Amino acid sequence: MPHFFRNESAHRATCIVAVTPPSHQPIAERGPGPMTMTAEEFRSHFPIFEEKAHLCSCSEGALSDRVIVAMSEFMTSWRVHGAPWHAWMEHVDLARGLFARLIHASPENVAVVSCASEAAYHVASTLDLRSSRRILTNDLEFPSVAHVWLAQKSRGAQTDFIAHKGGVITAEDYLGRIRGDHALVSVPLVSYANGLRLPVRTIADAAHAVGARVFVDAYQGLGVVPVDVRELDCDYLACGTLKYLLGAPGLAFLYVRPGLEFRVEPPLTGWFARQEPFAFDPGLLDYADDARRFQTGTPAIPAAFAGVAGMSLVLETQPQANLEHVLSLGDFLQDELLRAGFSLFSPTDRSLRGPQVSVLAQDAEGLGAFLADRGVLVSPRGQAIRISLHYYNSFDDARRVLQGVIDYRRTQPM
């Protein structure tokens, strides 16, 4: 069980934190361990479960003891050393390397950015729109990403939207819309709206057949849904750390397929996009040859510390065991909710469902607040509450949210 301790590894930090005692070796040097952690062991790293059922990872992952310690280490390094930039930037590189491991890529093919919207902008702003001027996406795309595509209208681009049918978008829906004048096809790994898992590889094959590039937003799946960019065959993949990767806001990554040619250089740039960032030559605009060309200014160092800690936990789980645990929880929730007469926005086909079950509600915000008052944290969005599941969730959590929704229906129409 977690207990109070003074963080001696943080050079006698002045605050007291309630977490499991860390190794005396800093997290940045420890790195992730073997992929053997069980769901129960994983859960033990998250103090919130002593009081609440955290079922809102689609909005923000639960805070782990490792992130608490990592943030203390950052604050202590700042207090003790003043400006340890070399050590801090090593931490950023460590975060880049851990993310690359998660998606089976090489670190040089990963750019460090601030958010998925910035990653999408880098992709959109470097598209060659001279001959192919269309972008294809869908209406279950996260709005912030879709808005970046729409903003390319000023450059002559047209964005086409595929409409979902009952919360589902199929490969055939994409294949029937992909055209030879599409410069980019955007497909989320998992939809933010209802947890729909999309057939990325099939769509990517069709897009590449007409010369279009493929962008994948993995924010709502990576950390639970195993990802191998070689198998997805995507050209770009973006994801941040604050959701299923269990970090903090302010840190995201953009994977760029090696070998891509760019006729348009990134208009949003900065010193970390240079071949030699520390050359300090204001008259030379020399983009890095790898994915670093899409970086800008100083990255969010505190978020890098949190990101390393969060991703290290994910990397200590067995990916298929993680996914199967989450899908089993989703099966239970889905079956019990349907049996109780609730309507779902999430797909009922297990093969199409990511780490989320969405329940339709006339007042999703009201239902979310009702559950929060009872210590059950979900994420209302539009017409539904999103019950998002991670490896740390249990069947007790699922039963708590199920009972809460049933109790709410006794007082309010659903």
Image (tube, rainbow, N blue to C red):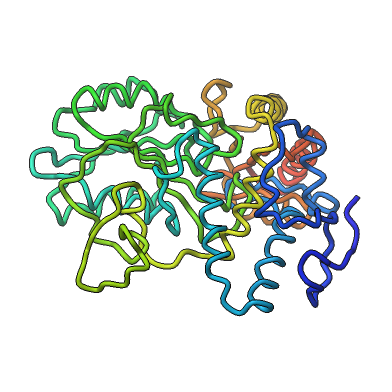
* Relative depth, front residue between 184 and 10: 10
Residue sitting at the far left: 131
Residue drawn where x is 29% and y is 48% of the image:
289
Q: Is residue 11 visible?
A: yes
User: How many labels were placed on the picture?
Assistant: 0
Position of 222 with respect to 181 (left or right) is right
* Relative depth, front residue between 355 and 410: 355
Residue drawn where x is 43% and y is 24% of the image:
231
Name the spot of residue 248 as percent of width and height, x first.
59, 58
User: In the picture shown, does residue 3 fall above or below 320?
Assistant: below
Name the spot of residue 106 as percent of width and height, x first.
45, 38
Name the spot of residue 343 as percent of width and height, x first.
59, 32
Residue drawn where x is 20% and y is 54% of the image:
265
Quick one: quadrant of the C terminus?
Answer: top right
User: In the picture shown, does residue 253 fall above or below 230?
Assistant: below
Name the spot of residue 215 as percent of width and height, x first.
34, 39
Position of 285 with respect to 326 (left or right) is left
Name the quadrant containing residue 283.
bottom left
User: In the picture shown, does residue 221 fall above or below 296?
Assistant: above
Q: Is residue 367 visible?
A: no
Position of 7 with respect to 186 (left or right) is right
